[in-house]
Image: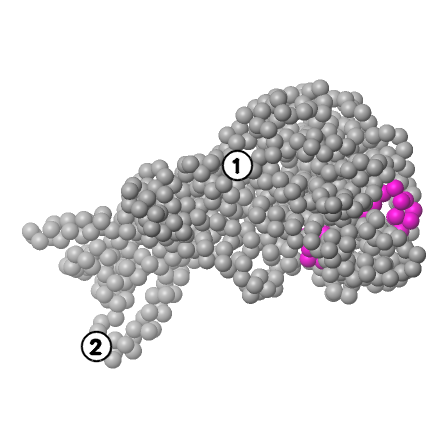
Amino acid sequence: MRGFPTRELKALVGFVIAQPILGTLHEILILAIAGLLEWLANAELLRRSARLFFSSPVHAELMLNTLGGAKAQGIAVGGGVGDALYRAVPSFFLTSEFVAPGAWVSAAIDRNGTVLGRFAALALVEILLMAIGAAVIRLGLRGRPVSVVIKKGKRRHLLYVVLGFFMQAQAIWAIFNLTRLPQMWALRDTGIGVALSLLLRLDPLVYNWLMDGFLPVFIPVVLAAIGLVGVWLVGKLFDVVEAPVSRFTGRPRRGLGAVSPVERAMFLAVLVPLIAVTPFLQGFFGTSKTAVITRKKLPLRVAPTSANVTPDAPTPPAILVVTPPTLTAPTQIVQATPTVSFVALARPTAFPVGIATLAPSSVASPTPTLALAPTVSPTPAGPAKVQIQQTDRGLAMTVNGQPRIVTGMNYNVNYTGLPDATKRALHRRDFNIMRDAGINAIIGWGVYDEVTLELAREYGIGVVMPFELDPKGPYEHEGYRTQVKENFRDFVLRFRGFPAVWAWNPGGDELLHRMDTEEHRTTDKLQIAADLLTELAALAYALDPNHVSIVKEPRDWYIQYFDEALKNVRTQPQQPDPTLYWVFGLNVYGHPDDVAAAIKQAKRNAEERLRVAMVVGEYAPFGLPRADRAIHYAMNWDDVYQFSLNGGFVYVFGPDQPNPQAPNPYDPLRLLVNEFSLVDMDGNPVDDALSTLAARWRQARNSNPP
C-alpha cells in the first residue's frame, strides 16, 4: 500500500507542473489559429470558393473579413522572462505589461478585432484541445481499460489519463463560456443576428428569444458535440491504421480500452469531477488568460471638450466625448469599455402619437416631443442647385455654389400611409434629432413625399429622392424600360421644384446587387439594368439640371457594368458628359480597416475609371463589440472624411424596420430587427454612437462651412 500514495502523489505533482505548459500551449494555439483564419480569409482561392456558397459576393467578402478579423497581436509572458522574450523576438512577443491580470501568459487580441473572428479562433482552439486531450488519454491507456490504468498503471500513464480528461473538461467548459459571457462574446456582436434577421425577417420578440435564449445554449452544445464526434472519428481512424501495424510488429493497439457499462461509469467518475472544478481553474490554474488590448489610439479630429463644439441650436443634444483605451494596459477579456464623459444633456419629454391606422389592431406608440418648430434658418425658397465641380482634390459636390461635405443619414421610413398629423409629428421628431446632430442630408430606401420635403426644408436638410425599381423587373423588354422612364419622368417633374431636393436616386438601393443575389439574374440582364440606371440619370439631368443623381451599390463589385454604360453615353453626340450629374454611391460595412480600404479602392475606380464623383452611400461597423460601437462609427467617419471628398451617409437612423408581413407594418411589437439603428422607437439614442458622430460631423462642418 505504501507505493500507491507515492504513485498518486507523483502523478499529482506532474499534473500541477504541466499546467503552465498547457496554458502556454493554449495561448500559442489562439495566436496560431487567429493568424491562420486571417491568412485563409485573405487567400484568393478561398475567396473564390466562398462565393459559391453565398448568393452575394459582397456577403461572402464581408463574412470572410469578419471571420478572419480577430487580429491577434502576439504572446505576452509575465515578469522579467516576458520582457527578455520581447527584446529577443519583438515580432512575436509583447512586453509583460500586456499579460491579463492574474495570468502568467496571455495571447493578446486587438480590441478592434471582430467578435466572430475571436469566437471562431477560441472555438477552434478548444476543439483542437479536445483532440489533443483524447490523444493524451490514448497514450496513457495503451490499449488497457481505464480501471486498470487507475489502479495499476505507471504514474506517467495515470498522469496522461488525468491530463487528457482535464484538457477535455476545460475545453468543453471554455466552449460554453463563449456564449456565457455576453459582455464580451454577445452573439449579437458576431453579425449572426443581422444575417438571421434579414433571412428570417424576425420581429424583436422572436429575435431576442433566439439570440439571448436559444442560441447561447444551442451553439456550445453543437460545438462540443462536433469536438467529441471529431475525437471519436480520429480515434477510429487511428484504430484502422494501427491494426495492421500491430499485427506486423506484435505491439498492442492503443485503443481506449473496454467500453463496458462499468468502464463508462469509470470514465464519468473521472470526467465529472474534473468538469466540476474547471470553473475554479480556468486558464489552467490561472496561468493563462486571453488579453484584449488596443494597439493604437483612436485618431480624434474632434476637440475633447465642450468649449470646442459649436452647437447648431440653442439647446444641443447630449454630446459624448469618447476616450479610447491606450496601449499602456491590457484588460481582461470581459473588460473593454471606453471612458465616456458627458458634456451637455437635453432629454426630451414624451407625448402619445398614433403610429398607424392601417389595421384595426393599430398600436399607439409614445414619441418624444422635441422642438417642433425649427430653430435654424430653413432652406431658402426655390430649388437648390447641386453641381459637380473639378477641384485639386477631385470631383466635389457644391450646393448653391458652395462646397458641401455630406454629413448624411440613411433614413429608411415609410410614413406615407399614416394620418397627416402623425406623419408630420414623426418627421418633425426625426428631423429635429438629425438637425441637432449635424445631419445635412438624408438618403435611403424609404418612401419620401411632399410632407417629407416640406419639413426637411424647415430643418435645413437636403433630400436624395429614392426611385425604387423592382429587381424582378423584365428590363430586357423595351416596353418595360419605356414605362419605367415615363414613371421616372413623372417622379422628377413632381418633386424637382422642392427646395429640399439635392439629388435623385434612380433604382433605389443596390438594384444590381439585388438582381444578382436575390433573383440570380445573368450578367447581360445586369448590364441592361446598369444602362437603364444611367439613362434615368441622364433623363433627370435633362429635365432638372439643378440636381445630380446618386446610384448606390455595394463596394465596387458592379463597377464594370457602369463603366460600360457610361462609355455608351459618352459616345452619343450632343449628350452632356455624365461627369456633370452622375455620382457613384458606395455602400460599405465591416472592420474599420476594411472600410477604409474599400473607400480608397472605390474612389479610384469612380474617379479614374468611371470619371465621376463618389459619395459614401452607407457606412457602418459590422461584427465588432457592441460596447465599442461609438468608437468604430467614429473611425468609419474618419475614413469617410479622409478619403471621400463628398462625405457620406451613416447607416442607419432607425428605429427598427417596418414589417411588411404584419397587418400593421409599424406595430412596435412586430418591427423587423435592425442592429444598426442609432435611435429607438421613441427617438432616443440607442447608445452614444449618434452623439459621438454628432461631435465629428459638427467639427467637419465647422472646418468646411457651407
| x, y percent for residue 530 | 79, 58
State the separation of the CA atoms marked 1 and 2: 61 Å
The residues colored magenta run: 539-558
Q: Whole-percent x and y of residue 291?
A: 40, 42
Foreground pick, 405 / 474: 405
* Left or right position of 243 against 702: left
Per the image, is 459 magenta? Answer: no
* Residue pictured at 51% horizontal, 50% vertical: 69
Q: Which residue is mark 2?
A: 250
Q: Is residue 307 above or below residue 610?
A: above
Q: Are marks 1 and 2 in contact (CB under 8 Å)?
A: no
Residue 443 vs 260, above or below: the answer is above
Residue 5 image offset from top left, x and y in percent? 12, 50
Q: Secondary structure at mark 2?
A: loop
Report the front residue among 681 and 184. 184
Quarter placement of the C terminus: top right
Looking at the picture, which amino acid does disc 1 mark? Ala
The tag on residue 627 is 1
310 with respect to 289 (left or right): right
Residue at 34% across / 47% down in the picture?
Answer: 87
How packed is label 2: few (under 14 Cα within 10 Å), some, or many (20 or more)? few
Which residue is at 65% across, 50% downward? 600
In screen coordinates, is 231 left or right of 628? left
Quarter of the figure with residue 563: bottom right
